[in-house]
Amino acid sequence: MTLKKSLLVGCGSYLPQRIVTNDELAKKVDTSDEWISKRTGIRQRHVAAEGEMTSDLAVEAARRALDNAGMEIGDIDLIVVATTTPDDTFPSTATKVQAKLAMEHGAAFDIQAVCAGFIYALATADNFIRAGQARAALVIGAETFSRILDWEDRSTCVLFGDGAGAVVLRAARADENVDDFGVLSTHLHSDGRHRDILYVDGGPSSTKTVGHVRMAGQEVFRHAVSKLSGVIDEALDANGLTSSAIDWLIPHQANARIIKSMAQKMKLPDDKVVSTIDRHANTSAASVPLALSEAMADGRVKNGDLVLFEAIGGGLVWGAGLVRIGAP
Ligand code: COA
């Protein structure tokens, strides 16, 4: 079997209209703009409206990604939605997105890898395309994390936001000389022993409730720095590259201090790192494609740029992906 390379040919995103500032949160819980911005870099977050669901955000992001790719839904034969906040326990949010996009062919399913969800979804769709099982995929990270926050727990409720980002992957055509364009490699890891440092205290099979996010922040921070730095090295080594080859680091947006520490480790200047944490907060599976979309829309990330994605989330699960954006 000839493996087909997948190319990342479009990106789009969507944020709910409502913005909640740190000052607004400080009226509800014992916190302050100073504490939140100093410890995390977050100044505000978007929060979905009543009745606005993860699939609604995902569909908007998907439409924009298709537009950006110059493709139509008829060209797509796979939808992968990374989410931890699905509309319903079932059917999958991906099938709801499929229906809302009026797509009646192909396959659609969800992936649950919390904040590393987009990397897991990217790896999955890339492997489907490489194996010839799909021609073109919408890879979406979409979350309404506001629905699983304990709004009385200041140690978690200030950290997250809602949003969606999507990319279009398509198989390289036989007549295209793709050279080193496309998804170069993806690297996935998990270690379920760390469940208790970041989890939701509910679920259909355990408590029969939806539950709320619980986190031991400092421990998560420590793991994030070591595991992300390990998987970044792994991605670079696998491609025989050093960090000087990277045009853009597009990291998961959980904490500005974690992002800074990754950039320092890679000896990348700030202007090669895409950061949206100040305005979006942590949007879990949506954070990486949201950041990519913003940097593509404002012209920072261009066709041919080499980008490194990384993310870590509850599980623990973590991963990285190296992609040369666009097509030759
Ligand atoms: N406002 C004000 N004070 C707060 C607060 C808030 N929103 N949240 C916690 N505090 C208090 C704590 O109660 C504690 O008070 P104490 O010293 O009197 O006990 C103090 O601030 C320090 O708390 P601590 O948890 O040690 O702070 P920290 O410097 O570790 O920062 C995080 C907390 C959550 C910002 C940080 O640990 C972090 O970002 N961790 C990683 C989170 C992450 O990446 N999660 C997602 C992974 S996908």
Image (cartoon, rainbow, N blue to C red):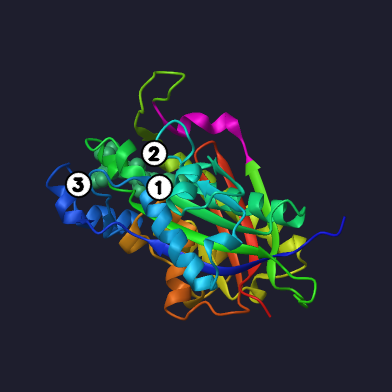
Residue 324, x across and y down, in percent: 65, 71
Q: Is residue 10 left or right of residue 171?
A: left
Q: Is residue 274 visible?
A: no
Q: Which residue is mark 2?
A: 87
Residue 18, x across and y down, in percent: 22, 56
Indicate the quadrant where residue 279 lies. Answer: bottom left
SS under mark 2: loop
Residue 59, x across and y down, in percent: 42, 55
Q: Which mark is residue 31?
A: 3
The verdict on label 3 being within 8 Å of ligand 1 is yes
Q: Are marks 3 and 1 in contact (CB under 8 Å)?
A: no
Q: CA distance from mark 2 to mark 3?
A: 30 Å
Q: Amino acid at mark 1?
A: Ser
Say few, some or many: other residues with alpha carbon within 10 Å of mark 3 (under 14 / 14 to 19 / 20 or more). some
Q: Is residue 212 left or right of residue 124?
A: left
Decide which of 103, 242 is in the foreground and name it: 103
How many numbered discs sit on the rendered protein? Answer: 3
Q: Which residue is mark 1?
A: 55
Q: Are marks 2 and 1 in contact (CB under 8 Å)?
A: yes
Residue at image location 76% in from the left, 54% down from the top? 132
Residue at image location 46% in from the left, 81% down from the top? 299
Counting residues from the N terminus, which is met first, the one under dot 2 or under dot 1? Answer: 1
Counting residues from the N terminus, which is met first, the one under dot 3 or under dot 1? Answer: 3
197, above or below 173, in the image: above
Q: Is residue 29 within the magenta segment? A: no
